[in-house]
Image (cartoon, helix red, strand yellow):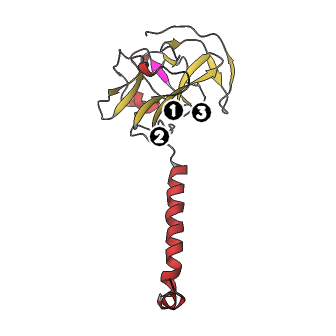
């Protein structure tokens, strides 16, 4: 733009364009940083269940064995569920939020693609399954790698970490807030699968 033409453009307009562009850029960056994941099933206090580009189930090593995670957050199976059927809703789903599919469900390191699937939730949306097990988070896990729900018997049945083989890990596994494990035992192939 020539200087003479630029001089005719009011100062607020000349200043507004770069400010508006900077504001749009900041908003785009801020929303991506503030919300790396999204899920339609999260309850208060629960961690996010899916990365923005989709859901990725991967493995994580802990003292009780190698178990599955989504975005670093531990996922669990529940003994009261049936094959490809969730029996956890209402208060159960508030404490144990379902891992909901967002975009494509993909396997991360150590995960068998053929074992990943989804089932329809009665309230809408698709819940991620692994080897037929509906997957859940635990609201008591406040950070990646924590396994505070391991062995819990909330809502009348046991909650277990999920091995990459698709079976329940029934050994104890205690993780620190930083996500590293500190105590535990050995992995067993318990559960159905």
Please check the rendered image and state whether residue 20 is part of the magenta-colored stretch, yes or no: no
Question: Which residue bears the numbered disc 1?
Answer: 139
Image quarter for residue 169? top right
- Within 10 Å of the Cα at label 1, are there few (<14), some (14-19), or many (20+) other Cα atoms? many
Please check the rendered image and state whether residue 84 is part of the magenta-colored stretch, yes or no: yes
Question: Which residue bears the numbered disc 3?
Answer: 144
CB within 8 Å, label 2 to label 1: yes
Image quarter for residue 182? top right
Residue 145 at what x, y percent from top left?
A: 61, 29
Q: Residue furthest front?
A: 2
Question: Which residue bears the numbered disc 2?
Answer: 44
Task: Decide which of tag 2 and tag 3 comes sooner along the chain.
Answer: 2
The segment highlighted magenta reads: 76-86
Q: Split into 4 quadrants, where in the image is the C terminus?
A: top left
Magenta segment, prevailing SS (helix, strand or loop): loop
Location of residue 53 with respect to 79 vertically, above or below: below
- Alpha-carbon span between mark 2 and mark 1: 8 Å
């Amino acid at each position: 733009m020539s200087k003479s033409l630029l001089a005719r453009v009011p100062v607020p307009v000349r200043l507004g364009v770069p400010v508006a562009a900077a504001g749009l850029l900041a908003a785009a960056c801020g929303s991506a940083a503030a919300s790396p994941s999204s899920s339609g099933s999260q309850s208060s206090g629960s961690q996010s269940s899916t990365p923005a580009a989709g859901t990725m189930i991967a493995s994580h090593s802990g003292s009780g064995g190698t178990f599955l995670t989504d975005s670093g957050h531990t996922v669990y199976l529940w003994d009261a569920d049936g094959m490809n059927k969730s029996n956890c809703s209402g208060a159960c789903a508030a404490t144990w939020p379902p891992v909901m599919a967002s975009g494509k469900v993909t396997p991360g390191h150590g995960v068998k693609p053929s074992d990943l699937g989804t089932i329809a939730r009665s309230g809408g949306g698709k819940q991620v399954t692994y080897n037929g097990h509906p997957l859940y988070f635990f609201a008591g896990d406040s950070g990646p790698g924590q396994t505070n729900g391991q062995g819990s018997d909330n809502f009348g049945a046991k909650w277990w970490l999920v091995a990459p083989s698709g079976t329940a890990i029934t050994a104890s596994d205690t993780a620190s807030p930083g996500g590293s494990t500190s105590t535990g035992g050995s992995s067993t192939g318990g559960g159905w699968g």
